[in-house]
Structure formats: C-alpha cells, structure tokens
Image (cartoon, helix red, strand yellow):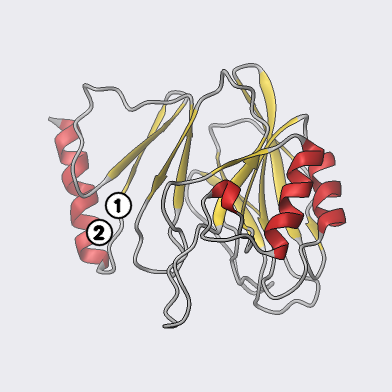
C-alpha cells in the first residue's frame, strides 16, 4: 500500500512482477493520491477507484485462507475535518472483511497517540460503526522536522479481520521520508531455517518470501540485499 504517491497522469509506476493500481486527485495536481502494488502471482478483483478532495481510495479483493479480504489504500489530507461519511461509505463498499491502510492524520489514546484530537474522535466513531479495530506499531511512524512538533503514530491499518488471523507489524526504518513504512504480516512467520541479517527485513505471504533493505545510499542498500541473497544461495 502506498498512501501518498504525488503522481500525476504523466507519472507511471512499473515494477516487474507486480500490478499497480492507483487513484489520482480530482484536480490532476501532484498531491495526495494512493496506490496498491499486487504480485502477479496473486489473483485479485479490483474495486473501482474513488476520489474526492478529502478522500482518495483504491482497493482490491484477495482470498486469504478461503476468506475474501479487501485490501485498501487511502489518502486523507491533513488540516481539515475527517470525512466521516465518505470514509464510512468507502468501508461499506468493501468486502465484509477488510484492511484499510492510510496516514489518517488522526490522534487518539486508543491507538497509542500522546493525546486525542478531533479527527481521532471522528475516526473512532467510524471504527465503532464498522466494527473495525486498529493495527498499529508500538512506536511513532511520523518523524517531523519542525522543532515544535512531536513524533506520532499516524500510519496504521483499520481492519475487522477475524481473530484467528493473527497479525504482526514491523517498522522498516526507511530514512527517505518523515514517515516510517510499516510491514504488516498476516498469519505468517519467516521459517527459522532461512538465514537472516541485521541489515535486512524478511516478510512472508503464503508461499512467497520478500527481502527488504533500506538505506539512504542506494549502493549500500544494494550491497545488503545482495549479501542476503548470497547467503540464501549457499
């Protein structure tokens, strides 16, 4: 899930082996927007994109453990009221079971914020009406550069996954943004016989395994990634 792409109609996202689903802003400018990247090995059924000034969403349905689950990525701009009605309508348009990832720009003690604001209270009402819960990390995902602002948990997931589908979140500590990417794993664990390194993160989905490396220097990032691949080939 990419929850803020800044794409315009002149931009394209092509990653080998993946299908890119995207939603653009109404005015065509390079702000907001959201996207989903889905492996070609995963069968899915996309939903029509939905866009407005205060909410842009893209979603697709994937069957996991015989359960159709909607995976949605959303962009909600800061500095305005949370679009409760639009967000509730979006959630109702998804499968009965869903996961919606976004930078919600909403703070509430219930999901680990330092305090509760108006958007947080509004989001909690949406969650209550849709029987959703939050899936969050245990530490901030937003790291402001402004001296008077504080780190916060702003990037998380809304979901109503059944209890037998366990989840685990990992922060990927990518220094390229003031927001920390979050890896969400569902009922998956890296096999203990697969070698790991301190410079990479492993994620698994069904029978697929992903290796993630992050560094501000692309050469160092590539070195960490190739080093892990070499370990696997031995």
Q: Give the residue at mark 1.
A: 213
Q: Position of residue 218 (x, y in %)?
A: 27, 66
**Residue 28 versus residue 107 in the image, above or below:** below
Dot 2, how many residues are within 10 Å of its Cα: few (below 14), some (14-19), or many (20+)? some
- The number of discs equals 2
Locate residue 118 relative to residue 177 in the image: left or right: right
Residue sitting at 37 percent across and 26 percent down?
189
Q: Position of residue 166 (x, y in %)?
A: 51, 25
Quarter-wise, where is residue 97 in the image? top right
**Furthest residue in direction bottom, as rendered:** 147
Locate residue 142 relative to residue 52 in the image: left or right: left
Residue sitting at 17 percent across and 32 percent down?
233
Q: Give the residue at mark 2.
A: 221
Residue sitting at 57 percent across and 32 percent down?
42
Q: Nearer the viewer, residue 138 or 167?
A: 138
**Residue 93 versus residue 14 in the image, above or below:** above
Q: In which quadrant of the rendered image does the C terminus lie? A: top left
Q: Position of residue 117 (x, y in %)?
A: 66, 64
Q: Which badge, 1 or 2, comes first in the chain's sequence?
A: 1
Residues at discs 1 and 2 in contact (Cβ within 8 Å): yes
Label 1: state its secondary structure.
Answer: loop
Q: Position of residue 58 (x, y in %)?
A: 71, 51
Q: Nearer the viewer, residue 102 or 47?
A: 102
Residue sitting at 67 percent across and 65 percent down?
33
């Amino acid at each position: 899930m990419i929850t803020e792409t800044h794409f315009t109609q002149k931009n394209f996202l092509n990653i080998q082996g993946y299908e890119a689903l995207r939603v653009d802003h109404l005015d065509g400018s390079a702000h907001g927007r959201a996207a989903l990247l889905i492996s070609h090995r995963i069968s899915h059924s996309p939903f029509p994109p939905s866009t407005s000034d205060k909410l842009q969403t893209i979603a697709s349905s994937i069957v996991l453990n015989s359960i159709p689950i909607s995976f949605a990525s959303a962009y909600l701009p800061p500095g305005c009221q949370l679009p409760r009605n639009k967000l509730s309508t979006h959630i109702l348009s998804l499968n009965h079971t869903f996961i919606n990832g976004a930078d919600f720009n909403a703070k509430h003690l219930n999901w680990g914020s330092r305090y509760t604001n108006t958007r947080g209270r509004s989001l909690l009402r949406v969650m209550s009406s849709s029987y959703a819960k939050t899936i969050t990390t245990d530490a901030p995902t937003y790291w402001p550069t402004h001296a008077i602002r504080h780190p916060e948990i702003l990037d998380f997931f809304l979901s109503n996954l059944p209890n037998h589908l366990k989840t685990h979140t990992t922060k990927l500590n990518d220094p390229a943004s003031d927001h920390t990417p979050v890896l969400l794993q569902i009922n998956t664990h890296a096999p203990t016989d697969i070698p790991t390194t301190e410079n990479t993160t492993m994620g698994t989905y069904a029978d697929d395994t992903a290796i993630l490396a992050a560094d501000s220097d692309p050469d160092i990032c590539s070195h960490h990634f190739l080093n892990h691949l070499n370990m696997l080939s031995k």
